[in-house]
Image (tube, coloured by chain):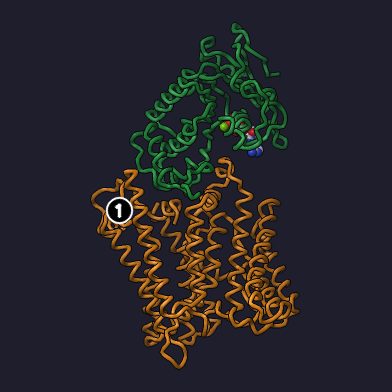
Chain colours: A green, B orange
Amino acid sequence: MSTAPLVEMRDIHKRFGGVHAVRGVSVDLHPGEVVGVLGHNGAGKSVLMKILSGAIAPDAGEIRINGEKVEIESPRDAQRHGIETIYQTLALADNLDAPGNLFLGRELLTRWGTLDDDAMENETRKVVRRLNPNFTNIKGAVRNMSGGQRQSVAIARAIYFNARILIMDEPTAALGPHETRMVGELVKQLKAEGIGIFLISHDIHDVFDLADRVSVLKNGNLVGTRRTTEVTKDQVLAMIILGKLPEDSAGEEMPGFH
Amino acid sequence: MGDATQAVKGRPPQDSGPQIGAFERFVQLTELDTRMLAMVGALVVIWIVFTALTDGIFLTPRNLYNLTVQSTVVGIMATGMVLVIVARHIDLSVGSILGFSGMVLAVFQVEILPLGVWWNWPLTVVMALAVGAAIGAWQGYWIAYRGVPAFVVTLAGLLIFRGCAWIVTEGRTVAPMDPTFQVFGGGIQGSIGAVWSWVTGVLAIAFVVFNAFTSRAKRHRYGFPVKPMWAELGIILVATAIIVGFVMVMNAYTLPRSDIPRGIPVPVLILMIVVVFMMFISRATKFGRYVFAMGGNPEAAELSGIDVRKTTLMVFVLMGVLCAIGAVITTARLNAGANSMGLLAELSVIAAAVIGGTSLAGGVGTVAGAILGAVVMQSLENGMVLLGVSSAMRQVIIGLVLIAAVWFDTAYNRHRR
Ligand SMILES: Nc1ncnc2c1ncn2[C@@H]1O[C@H](COP(=O)(O)OP(=O)(O)O)[C@@H](O)[C@H]1O
Ligand SMILES: [Mg+2]
């Protein structure tokens, strides 16, 4: 592509004590593109994405947004760059209700500067309706909600604020087949709106049909990045399990696996 | 309390079937908090039992007046302790903060500043509040920015500030306080009289009505469901009855050798202002929302971009200021600054918050509950004193009540899941 990518993460490193969780990984993402980030549990996917969302500071490497180098030092910084994240753990405050969680840190206020709970409830109903029309009881503590409802709240929070870049870390982990399909539809819809999406999963089946490209991680290394039109599922599986690149397809960019 | 806690506390799912009992339907329609109702029920039982055992002495205006005044200091501090515990911290130093800020206040008022000038007592009150805020900021700094557990910092604070209180006068008691200042203690001059009590009562009723109808109108505008009119009016009626009853009782207690009504004691007025303020903080401000979010899931709060450290620091500053307000009332009531002020208060304050439904696991608690908790504790204490129960025995019983209350809470929550 000729224009600068929406997001470029270059040569990112992160250590936790003795654990080298991310070792010189580079990935990128274009507007309206879905990039699947695949790998076994513990491969470093969540850490890599948390670096982009400002939750973890990298030890080395740089991040570019629209070609410009940026410093993302906190979740606030990431939000300012239009990056929204659905965390694997959902990151919900269990004791708050759905509107409380959706607007956490970005509350709607009345003209006196107090919380405008009714306005927040109203907005939450609108966005949740789009995701899950059956989910109307949004005023209870999210602690008492089903896995699917909690997931809906986390997704609603990520899409409400007009993200340009969306990180979905195992978004269907808690969902049944029907809800999983709805998330798939949502991904397509957001993609059509020009949003760039990192779709993270340990399961290739969640990702392959939705993604334009897949980046595979293993033990903190980038095995490689491939267009989904140019590889088969089996070849990607070999990348995930063996860390082995398919021989017939040319590597698109820097093979990170040494 | 805020939607946050209300949600936790007892709204049944909207789609609960038609077979639910009449009581549950009533609770659902009125949006009452069942746990709070249970506490009010427990309080009523305690009052009935003590009234029976004391041949009615417990329920005389004189005793109820004293009971309310006695509840104020613990009640005021408990509203802050709720936020501290909701944020997954603890403050063991509140009694010592009260003692130290009270000693500073007393020494300046009685020995350092000129006596009899009008600005003496207001200045010393401001100084006490500043001392409380500064101690809160100091402890909050170690907890929030240096990562020392609140248990350790405030346990140290319990020693440090008790020691500081002693050092101020080398243990001497300082007296007497400024006569105007003594009004804060709720003694002979320390109440606002019949007329102002009624004015306060009417204002409180107007506030309740205004609140109910503005929030109703707002929900209407968004097309949200509102509770039925009878429920709204019923709640207003009950609140009005409680306010009117309270004013009548306070007015029924007269000044010595006269039939001049005392009216609402000044410390109770202060408590009322603190309660309204703390309810506002915890339900209607970002700060309050963040405290609850931190208690519910600290990681989520951090990931939402909340400044968790600053919020934690502010919680302890608020706690320190409330302790200083407690010190104002205590020195005015004692008409002195003494070293025993606030001794063991941390226990009553934490107990009031916990009996009032604050969860030590964090994330759950209400200001109203803490006040009820303080009144429950003080009612037990007061009733047992009337019955001539020894102070040792009173401690045993209050300790047992604390265990029972927390056990009840645990069982209640398990049942609700
Ligand atoms: N906060 C942390 N502290 C220490 N080690 C961590 C932390 N977060 C992740 N790790 C480690 O980093 C590695 C990669 O984890 P992660 O990115 O969560 O894997 P996954 O690909 O399953 O999302 C794992 O070995 C994990 O134990
Ligand atoms: Mg992960």
Q: Position of residue B337 (x, y in %)?
A: 66, 79
Q: Nearer the viewer, residue B401 or B87?
A: B87
Q: Position of residue B245 (x, y in %)?
A: 36, 75
Residue at the image position 74 percent from the left and 75 percent from the top: B168
Q: Position of residue B44 (x, y in %)?
A: 37, 73
Q: Which of B95 and B175 is in front in this view?
A: B175
Residue B319 visible in this rendered orientation of the protein: yes
> In terms of image quadrants, where is residue B242?
bottom left
In the image, taking residue B38 as reference, residue B284 lies left or right, namely right
Q: What element carries label 1?
A: loop
Residue A200 visible in this rendered orientation of the protein: no
Q: In which quarter of the image is ligand 1?
A: top right
Q: Label 1 marks which chain's residue?
A: B
Say which residue label 1 marks.
Answer: B227
In the image, taking residue B107 as reference, residue A132 lies left or right, namely left
Amino acid type at circle 1 is: Lys
Judge the density around disc 1: few (<14), some (14-19), many (≥20) Cα neighbours within 10 Å: few
Q: Position of residue A155 (x, y in %)?
A: 46, 34
Which residue ends up furthest to the front in the rendered image? Answer: B118
